[in-house]
C-alpha cells in the first residue's frame, strides 16, 4: 500500500509542472501525439467529418494533411485530379473552420502505385519521411489513413527506417473470416483496399509498420441518423452547416439511383476515436475492442491469405461509437459558443 502511495505521489510531482503550464495557458488539454491525416476528401464526406473532429481535438498535434486519390473513375470523383481535389477540399474546410495554425496541406499522387516495388514520388511522401525521422520531439507519431495507402507505402519503400517510428491507423480491408461475415451484396475487393492494392501489399506483406486496422465490419458500425445530423451538427454554426450540407447534397444526388435510408456511415471517424480519445492513464483506445492477429498477406486480387510469418497487428472489431460521436457533437457545440 505504501509503495502504491509513493508511486502516486511521484506521478503527481511529475505531472504538476505540466498541469501548471496548462492552467497558465487556460488549456486543460495539451497535445500528447502527432498525427498526419491522409484521406480522400473529394470522395465520401465522412473524411471531412473526421478531419473537422480532429481539428477540434486539442490532444493531437496535426502535423500535416494529405489529400489522396480514389479508384479510377470513382463515382464520388471520376476526375484524373482526385488528390488535387481532395487537398482543395481540406483547405476549404480549414477556411470554414478559420483554423489559425499553419497546417501544411499536400496533394498526394493522383494515381495508384505502378507495382509493389516502385514508390510514387511527391511532397506528401517526403513529408511523412521527414516527420517520422524527427528527433526533436518525444510525441508519438500516428499516420491516419481513411482511404488508400499509396503515400505511406511509398514512404516506407523510399526509406524503410521509418517503419518503427510511427503507427498506422487504417480504415480499410474486408472482414476476417473468424471475426465477422461480410454485409449483403458486399464488394470485393473492399472499397479502400481496392484504391491501391499494390500499396496494401507493401504495407502488409513487405513492411514492419505497426498497424491498427479498422476493417469493414468495424467501420460500418459508425452510424449516425439524419435526425442526429440535423439537431446536433447542422444547427451548430458554420462548420456544422457546411458538413451537413455536403452530405445532404450527396444524399440527393444518390437518391434517383439508390435509396440509402436515414442512417449514414461516418466510417472514417474511428481515426479520431483511436487517437484523440485514448484513455488518460495508460493511454490506449481502451473503450474499443480489438484482437491481435498475424498480419495476412494481401494477394493481387485484394484478398487476405494466411501468413504464418506475419507480424502482430491490431484488428478492431468493436468501436465505442457513443464516445466518438458524443465527443464530436459536444466539440461542435462548444466551438459554436
Image (cartoon, rainbow, N blue to C red):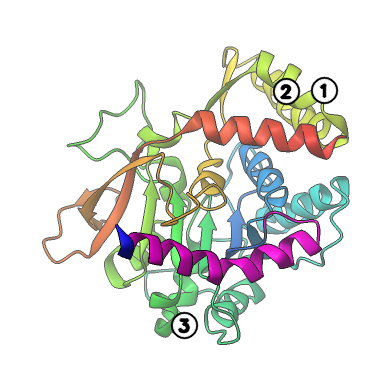
x and y percent of residue 104 in the render? 75, 68
Q: Which mark is residue 280?
A: none
Residue at the image position 38 percent from the left and 54 percent from the top: 212
In the foreground, 210 or 189: 210
- Considering every residue shown, the one lying at the far bottom of the view is 135
Residue at the image position 30 percent from the left and 29 percent from the top: 182
Judged from the image, the secondary structure of the residue bearing numbered disc 3 is helix
Q: Is residue 312 visible?
A: yes
Q: Is residue 149 above or below residue 72?
A: below
Q: Is residue 64 visible?
A: no
x and y percent of residue 185 in the render? 36, 23
Residue at the image position 79 percent from the left and 36 percent from the top: 334
In the displayed structure, does residue 144 sit left or right of residue 201?
right
Judged from the image, the secondary structure of the residue bearing numbered disc 1 is loop
Q: Is residue 136 above or below residue 113?
A: below
Separation of marks 1 and 2 at Cα, in angstroms:
6 Å
Q: Which mark is residue 235?
A: 1
x and y percent of residue 91 in the render? 80, 55
Which comes sooner in the sequence, label 3 or label 2?
Answer: 3
In the displayed structure, does residue 157 sit left or right of residue 1?
right
Contact flag, marks 1 and 2 (Cβ < 8 Å)? yes
Q: Which residue is mark 3?
A: 158
Contact flag, marks 3 and 2 (Cβ < 8 Å)? no
In the foreground, 323 or 3: 3
Q: Which mark is residue 232?
A: 2
Which comes sooner in the sequence, label 3 or label 1?
Answer: 3
Name the quadrant of the N terminus: bottom left
Taking the magenta stretch, the answer to whether it contains residue 191 is no
Could you say which quadrant of the image residue 300 lies in?
bottom left
Q: Which residues are magenta?
A: 4-29
Amino acid at each position: 500500500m505504501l509503495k502504491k502511495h509513493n508511486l502516486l505521489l511521484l506521478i503527481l510531482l511529475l505531472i504538476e509542472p505540466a498541469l501548471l503550464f496548462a492552467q497558465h495557458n487556460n488549456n486543460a488539454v495539451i497535445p500528447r501525439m502527432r498525427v498526419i491525416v491522409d484521406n480522400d476528401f473529394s470522395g465520401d464526406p465522412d473524411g471531412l467529418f473526421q478531419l473537422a473532429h480532429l481539428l477540434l481535438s486539442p490532444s493531437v498535434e496535426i502535423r500535416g494533411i494529405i489529400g489522396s486519390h480514389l479508384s479510377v473513375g470513382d463515382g464520388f470523383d471520376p476526375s484524373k485530379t482526385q488528390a488535387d481535389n481532395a487537398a482543395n477540399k481540406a483547405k476549404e474546410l480549414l477556411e470554414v473552420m478559420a483554423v489559425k495554425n499553419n497546417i501544411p496541406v499536400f496533394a498526394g499522387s493522383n494515381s495508384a502505385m505502378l507495382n509493389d516495388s516502385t514508390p510514387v514520388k511527391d511532397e506528401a511522401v517526403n513529408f511523412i519521411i521527414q516527420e517520422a525521422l524527427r528527433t526533436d520531439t518525444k510525441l508519438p507519431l500516428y499516420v491516419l489513413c481513411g482511404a488508400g495507402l499509396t503515400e505511406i507505402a511509398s514512404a516506407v519503400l523510399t526509406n524503410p527506417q521509418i517503419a518503427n517510428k510511427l503507427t498506422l491507423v487504417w480504415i480499410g480491408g474486408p472482414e476476417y473470416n473468424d471475426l465477422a461475415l461480410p454485409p449483403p451484396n458486399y464488394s470485393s475487393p473492399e472499397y479502400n483496399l481496392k484504391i491501391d492494392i499494390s500499396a496494401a501489399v507493401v504495407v502488409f506483406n513487405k513492411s514492419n509498420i505497426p498497424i491498427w486496422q479498422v476493417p469493414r465490419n468495424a467501420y460500418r458500425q459508425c452510424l449516425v441518423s439524419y435526425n442526429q445530423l440535423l439537431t446536433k451538427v447542422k444547427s451548430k454554426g458554420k462548420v456544422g452547416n457546411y458538413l451537413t450540407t455536403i452530405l445532404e447534397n450527396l444524399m440527393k444526388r444518390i437518391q434517383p439511383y439508390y435509396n440509402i435510408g436515414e442512417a449514414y456511415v461516418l466510417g472514417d471517424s474511428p481515426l479520431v476515436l483511436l487517437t484523440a480519445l485514448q484513455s488518460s492513464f495508460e493511454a490506449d483506445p481502451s473503450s474499443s475492442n480489438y484482437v491481435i492477429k498475424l498480419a495476412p498477406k494481401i494477394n493481387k486480387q485484394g484478398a487476405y491469405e494466411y501468413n504464418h510469418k506475419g507480424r502482430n497487428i491490431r484488428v478492431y472489431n468493436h468501436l465505442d461509437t457513443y464516445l466518438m460521436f458524443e465527443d464530436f457533437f459536444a466539440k461542435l457545440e462548444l466551438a459554436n459558443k
